[in-house]
Image: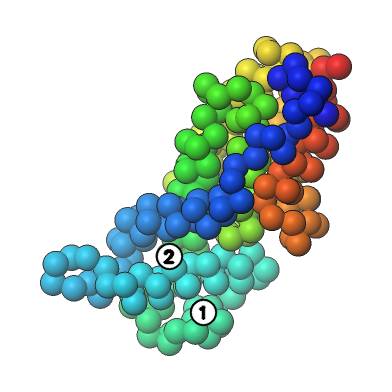
Amino acid sequence: MTICGSPHRSARDFAIPSCLETHHILRVRLRSLRWLSRYQCHRDRLGIMRADAARNLDAIVQTAARLLAEDPGTSLTAIAAEAGVSRHVVYRRFENREALRDAVFHTKLDAVDVVLGDARLDSAPVAVALHRFVEGIIAVDRHYPVGPDQMRCDDEGHGRMVEQREQVARFIRRAMDERLIRSDLPDGIVHALLYQIIALLARQLRDHDPARTADIVVDTFLRGVSQN
């Protein structure tokens, strides 16, 4: 595939280092703990979450993301058991399933914010920004597999998701202006196609790391909507 005018450069040439997933998720966890701390009732006298409490909270949220994606009616007791903590630990932080669900959604949205910032959709070369965005979103979706339909249950979370999608829509319009992708398709088709390809291949290629999966997503996307 030709990118940025060179027949010798592929999407792989623009891949983020293979440590992306670990580095990215660590950044997200540090950021998200600030948001999640509003649910944290057991803090030390300095007001700082203890390391063991932070680990428990991270385990609860990641487990909840996976189980609630499979079954939105999963109980807090079941989530606690799967996360390896007592149900009392969960109930100290979250008064009900809805509060935990909101924490999961906002943690994922925080992660997407990090991806959008790292991708620099408004300033990086389009092909570079596209690969960075796709690779980051794949990593986030695999850690927090709750879908957009579930996120609409929370008004604040849905509003944040809509704003993030608008940032991507502006990037797609920029890619059209630079003639990397076609501009003659019905409104919204390219945007929807990108997300569908990401979701499909992120699930089907779980044995591939995010960088390799992003190579395939970007190649499939550009071959399908390429200007040339």
SS at mark 1 in the image: helix
Q: Can the viewer see residue 159 in this picture?
A: no
Which residue type does callout 1 highlight? Ala
Q: Position of residue 36 (x, y in %)?
A: 36, 60
Identity of the residue drawn at 50% across and 37% down: 118
**For numbered disc 2, what is the local secondary structure?**
helix
Q: Find residue 169 and report its horizontal and vertical position in percent.
A: 62, 27
52 over 141 or under it: above or below: below
The residue that mark 1 highlights is 83
Q: How is the image coloured?
A: rainbow
Q: Is residue 189 left or right of residue 102?
A: right
Q: Using a 10 Å C-alpha cutoff, classify the residue at mark 2 as few (fewer than 14 neighbours), some (14 to 19) or many (20 or more).
A: few
The label nearer to you, 2 versus 1, is: 1
Q: Position of residue 120 (x, y in %)?
A: 52, 29
Residue beneath the point at 74% across and 48% down: 213
Could you tell me how far apart the alpha carbons at marks 2 and 1 are, in whole angstroms?
A: 17 Å
Q: In the rendered view, does 207 fall on the left or right side of 107? A: right
Q: Quadrant of the C terminus?
A: top right
Of residue 113 and residue 132, the one placed in the foreground of this image is 132
Q: In the image as oriented, which residue stretches furthest toward the front?
A: 8
For the residue marked with disc 2, what is the amino acid?
Ala
Q: Could you tell me if the residues under marks 2 and 1 are in contact, i.e. CB atoms within 8 Å?
A: no
Q: For residue 11, which numbered disc appears in the image?
A: none
Give x and y (percent) for residue 178.
68, 13
- Position of residue 35 relative to residue 113, above or below, is below
Q: Which of the 4 image quarters holds residue 194? A: top right
Q: Residue at x 56, y 82 (%)?
A: 82
Q: Earlier in the sequence, mark 2 or mark 1?
A: 1
Which label sits on residue 99?
2
Residue drawn at 22 percent across, 65 percent down? 48
